[in-house]
Image: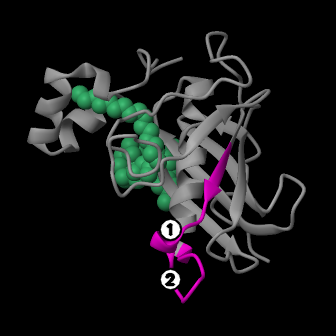
Amino acid sequence: MTASRTDLPADATVAVRHPDAPAPGTVLPAHYAHCFGCGAAERHGLHLAIVAGEGVEVTATFEVTEHHQGAPGLAHGGLLASALDEILGMLGHLTRMSCVTARLETDFRRPVPVGSTLHLRSRADGVAGRKLYASAEGRLGGTDGPVAVRARALFVQVGLEHFAEHGRPEDLEAVARDPRLIGVPDYTVNP
Ligand SMILES: CCCCCCCC/C=C\CCCCCCCC(=O)SCCNC(=O)CCNC(=O)[C@H](O)C(C)(C)COP(=O)(O)OP(=O)(O)OC[C@H]1O[C@@H](n2cnc3c(N)ncnc32)[C@H](O)[C@@H]1OP(=O)(O)O
């Protein structure tokens, strides 16, 4: 098999948990109240409650409902990829790197029925310059259940200007009026 663009490069170093990262077991604050993955204010969102683990690892549970269907009674694959993207992105809470997804590779191993609970886990595999390599999985029914979905991802560290330059003005203005919409402490752009 050829090398994937999410393979850890030879010069990668171990991802380090920031000394001020929330303690293991802490429910991580939504990074943005209107985030589709974790925001409480987003009526149609996934509302993932994401918990800090040991090292650079986070976990979450995802209750799959009738609102998440692709085929009758089964979860939509793109939506499962969104849940994986979200718990991968939340690793930034532990590294204090503000990152965006550059590449997300997803394997769908088993169908995920409506009514099931998906146990999600992500971990940072390594860092090379601005690039954070990470992987995630979702298991059915329990943390030791069968793997239904798996992902490998490359995140790229960006400064806050990334959001300021590209975001829609009215949403940025809403954040300026109410900074509590952003639930991350001062992100360190160059840790
Ligand atoms: C005032 C308001 C303040 C607001 C504050 C908000 C705080 C929020 C905090 C935290 C947010 C957490 C959010 C989590 C949510 C879940 C995660 C998402 O869904 S994120 C959304 C989806 N993703 C995107 O929209 C990215 C779109 N893409 C881009 O913007 C650019 O392409 C970007 C930033 C990824 C890279 O662009 P470049 O110009 O900065 O850098 P280049 O040189 O192109 O890439 C850097 C390195 O990465 C490699 N690279 C880039 N893309 C790659 C790819 N697809 N595959 C392989 N390698 C790639 C390149 O080859 C390069 O590698 P070499 O340094 O040369 O070794």
- The reply to whether the residue tagged 1 has its Cβ within 8 angstroms of ligand 1 is no
Q: State whether residue 183 appears in this view.
A: yes
Q: Residue at x 61, y 28 (%)?
A: 27
- Up the image or down, 164 lies above or below 153; here it is above
Between 140 and 90, the one nearer to me in the picture: 140
Among numbered discs 1 and 2, the one appearing first in the sequence: 2
Q: Kindly tell me whether residue 158 is visible in this rendering.
A: no
Left or right position of 181 against 63: left
The spot of residue 162 in percent (x, y) is: 29, 37
The amino acid on which the numbered mark 1 sits, given as a three-letter code, is Leu
Residue 138, compared with residue 176, is above or below; it is below
Q: The residue tagged with tag 1: helix, strand or loop? A: helix
Q: CA distance from mark 1 to mark 2?
A: 9 Å
- On the image, which quarter does residue 53 sit in? top right
Q: Residue at x 79, y 27 (%)?
A: 54
Is disc 2 surrounded by few (<14), some (14 to 19) or many (20+) residues within 10 Å?
few
Badge 1 vs badge 2, beta-carbon distance below 8 Å: yes
Quadrant, the N terminus: bottom right
Residue position marked by numbered label 2 in the rendering = 70
Name the residue carrying label 1.
Answer: 79
- Nearer to us in this view, 65 or 189: 65
- What scheme was used to colour the molecule? one colour
Residue 69 forms part of the magenta stretch? yes
Screen quadrant of the C terminus:
top right
Region rendered in magenta: 60-77
